[in-house]
Amino acid sequence: MKSAVRRIPLAKPWIDEREEELVLEVLRSGRLSLGPTIERFEEMVADRVGAPYAASVSSGTAGLHLLVRIAGIGEGDEVITSPLSFAASANCFLFEGATPVFADVDRRTWNMDPAAVEAAITDRTKAIVAVDMFGYPCELGPLMDLCERRGLELIEDSAEALGAEYRGGAIGSHGPPAVFGFYPNKQVATGEGGVVTTHSEETWQLLRSLRNQGRSYEGGGWFNHVRLGFNYRWTDVQAAIGIAQFEKLDRIVKLRSAAADRYAELLAGIGGIELAPADDAEHRRSWFVYVLVLDPSIDRARVMADLRERGVDCAEYVPCIHLQTYMREAYGFREGECPIAEELASRTMALPFFTTIEPEDQEYVVDALRASLEG
């Protein structure tokens, strides 16, 4: 009889009685959507990140798309983004017919290299979608200067970076609109959902209108739609979960940081691996996932298969956007166009990581990894 294998998941949300309490309040209220719980959540977000306005949406992708629409980006325009990110960082402007351009990353930070971004600008460039990859802040200062100098829109894809800081300020507080996501593996998990923070009242008003089929909130009737919009509404049930999560956000950030420090200690001395970029004077990460880079001599597929056999969930994190099948077929992207990102993506691997991961589970993960690397 085969013995049971210990299983450690890649990610898991931290949900407790407070989330249940607030969800039950919403269910009993009868206001399941477009209600006061959403407004309360948005106020909490704006206050937390230091932006005057916040608008909740059905996903981080939806938030990015709405910012692209508001910026007037469309066919004939080029938008520059990072090749080392989730597909939504590019999909958001493909929806509007713009052409993707990818600027390679800095090997030290794993985020877009501002020099590569500037080199990619043409007379068709309309905007930059900057990514705070794996919760590590992008080079926001140089990118803001570049956009101001060249007359470009800047959108910050901060879906993985809630709680991170750049130059002492919370991500979302620096001026450009930022988008955060609440998928179950994120710092704040509501199942699905996202929020856009902005310093522009006009942008905020447009976000509220566009997420609800272009409805006007400035007088007129309930069905007064003044522009083409979308159903990117969120629900009060999800907002209730979000409120409970935000109430413990500081603790979440600290617990995840402690778990990351614990991994770093346990992994010290193991050859053939490289850890994620460390914080410095300008960048303070909010830990989203725990990603390693394996030495080129190591067979990543074999290591991952071996870890799964030992009950340790893991994943490639993440393939380059420009080498995804649809990007190759639609735009002709090929290997070699973003060599630093491609080299990283071919060797990165995520280990189990979540707010409530137990120290003994991390020890088990590292022991399994060590045995696999030595095997």
Image (cartoon, helix red, strand yellow):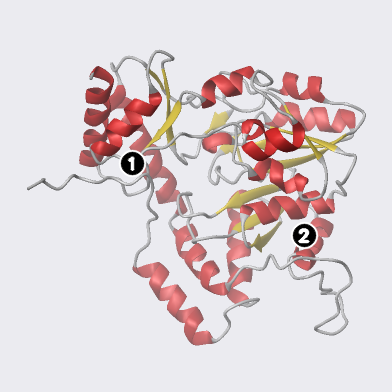
Q: Position of residue 179 (x, y in %)?
A: 65, 49
Q: Is mark 2 on a helix, strand or loop?
A: helix
Q: How crowded is mark 2: few (under 14 residues within 10 Å), some or many (20 or more)?
A: many
Of the two numbered discs 1 and 2 in the rendering, the one whose residue sits closer to the viewer: 1
Q: Is 87 rendered above or below residue 37?
A: above
Q: Residue at x 65, y 18 (%)?
A: 336
**Horizontal arrangement in the rendering, residue 202 relative to residue 239 (left or right):** right
Q: How crowded is mark 1: few (under 14 residues within 10 Å), some or many (20 or more)?
A: many
Quadrant in which the C terminus is drawn: top left
Q: Distance between the residues labelled 1 and 2?
A: 40 Å
Q: Is mark 1 on a helix, strand or loop?
A: loop
**Horizontal arrangement in the rendering, residue 144 relative to residue 251 (left or right):** right
Q: Position of residue 86 (x, y in %)?
A: 59, 40
**Horizontal arrangement in the rendering, residue 264 relative to residue 172 (left or right):** left
Of labels 1 and 2, earlier in sequence is 2
Q: Which residue extends farthest left?
A: 1
**Horizontal arrangement in the rendering, residue 278 relative to residue 300 (left or right):** right
Q: Which residue extends farthest front?
A: 329
The three-letter amino acid code for the residue at tag 2 is: Trp
Q: Where is residue 1 in the image (x, y as percent from the top left)?
A: 7, 48
Q: Which residue is drawn at 46% across and 23% down?
A: 347
Which is nearer the eye, 9 or 167?
A: 9
Q: Position of residue 109 (x, y in %)?
A: 57, 24
Dot 2 corresponds to which residue?
204
Which is nearer the eye, 36 or 7?
A: 7
Please say whether residue 262 is visible from this viewpoint.
Answer: no
Q: Which residue is drawn at 55% across and 86% down?
A: 30
Q: Which residue is drawn at 71% across and 56% down?
A: 52
Dot 1 corresponds to which residue?
313
Q: Which residue extends farthest right?
A: 123
